[in-house]
Image (cartoon, rainbow, N blue to C red):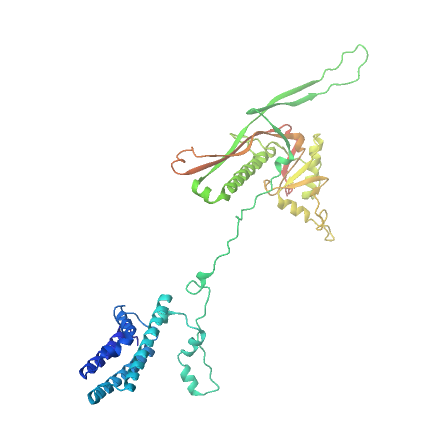
Amino acid sequence: MKLTRKSFVLVGLAVLAMFSLGAQAAGVDVGALLAPHADVLAGLSMLAFAGEVTLTDPEAIARELKRIGDDVKSAGEKALKEAGDAGKLSLETKQQVDELLVKQGELQVQLQDALQKFARKGGDEGQRAKSLGEQVIEAEGLKEFVDSGSKNRRFSVSIKSITSAAASAGDGVAPDRRPGVQLLPQRRLTIRDLISPGTTGSNLIQFLQETGFTNNAAPTTEATKKPQSSITFDLKQAAVVKIPHFMKASTEILSDFAQLQSIIDVKLRYGLALVEEAQLLKGSGAGNNLNGIYTQATAYSAPIALTGNTRIDVLRLALLQAELAEYPSTGITLNPIDWAAIELTKDSTGGYIFANPQQTAQPMLWGRPVVPTQAMDVDTFLVGAFQLGAQVFDRQQANVTIATENEDDFVNNLVTILAEERLALAVYRPEAFVKGDLTPAA
């Protein structure tokens, strides 16, 4: 049952109206009697115009109002009787009426407090989350369980606990956002560091390459014609190529996400270096591509025949081939998978041949440093005199340019971020490098 404030007011006013009419009919001065209680009458008048609001405990307030109404009715009947018999009210009756009116005023204050609590909570009190005790007390079957008095029975209650779900308390949990951006890993680049560096102010590198030498030097006798030797050259050239790429971003995101510009800068430069390494090693030489070291290297041809060759044997024979060409190798490049396979090679007792799991030294094989790189395909190798046989020339080192004049960027609030570099690669002596398959053919 729900009772509204308007109903309370109507009941109170009805009782007061009955009391007033009866007292006036008996000749009682009602105005003088209620004058000390003008605040109560004003409060009731205000409640009459406050609209209909549902109370939080209507049954208790209804019982209290009914009791006071009954008391007021009894007091009114008693007052009418006394007024008819004696023409005036007794002091006891007047005090009783005063007490009832005061009680009614206190009830009004309680009513106002209940309304204020309701307004602060912003909704029906019945919709609040019930405590664990309330859920147990109101559970169905509890009374039957208690009345049964059985010691062998159990009673369970499904408790609606507070959880992190959105419908419970989950919305109150703030995420712990970590600063920064977790970027993808970047490959370790090594090929440029193996060869000689250089710069150029032109768009074309040219160099003379000795292609032949006939050495006829020999001892001679007096008055004998001296032997003549010869040497031939060939003009070689390496064009400067450009490696560019760009990204677009809005001016708003660059302003709102300050770190983004540096991230783009780093990624654009890394993209250039990644392609550069692939070009230095395996550029095809066609079109706007570098003519890579591996592309021009001499194919592997075992100087001596061995049986049961292993990966380690093949690499030693390749070093021998380069040395016989008068270009002693200064390094070995392999795919990391192939180098791991070599490190894991064991002897007949199960011991590692070259690797020591506790060592942290530079990878070495046959006295040469090993450079593992994913730029090399699995099961391939390249050995050579890197600094003697090749040189890279920078015409324009990697740089990043930002502009808004590209296409319709300006009217679309876009920014073009461009990264580019220009370089050339001169492989002076292709025979200084030896390439081939690491696993011997069956």
In the rendered image, the quadrant that contains the N terminus is bottom left
Q: As drawn, which residue projects farthest toward the bottom? A: 85
Q: Is residue 309 visible?
A: no
Q: In this view of the protein, which residue sits in the foreground, 29 or 292?
A: 29
Residue at 27% x, 69% y is 46
Q: Is 408 on the left or on the right of 286, as rendered?
A: left
Residue at 75% x, 18% y is 217
* x and y percentages locating residue 51 in the rendered image: 27, 68
Label tally: 0
* x and y percentages locating residue 147 in the rendered image: 42, 87
Q: In this view of the protein, which residue sits in the foreground, 96 or 322?
A: 96
Q: Is residue 22 above or below residue 241?
A: below
Q: Is 107 on the left or on the right of 152, as rendered?
A: left
Q: As drawn, which residue projects farthest toward the right? A: 222
Query: For residue 94, which quarter of the picture?
Result: bottom left
Query: For residue 78, which quarter of the picture?
Result: bottom left
Residue at 67% x, 46% y is 342
Q: Is residue 385 visible?
A: yes
* x and y percentages locating residue 420 in the rendered image: 52, 33
Q: In this view of the protein, which residue sits in the foreground, 379 or 28?
A: 28
* x and y percentages locating residue 155 in the rendered image: 45, 80
Query: For residue 270, which quarter of the picture?
Result: top right
Residue at 67% x, 22% y is 212
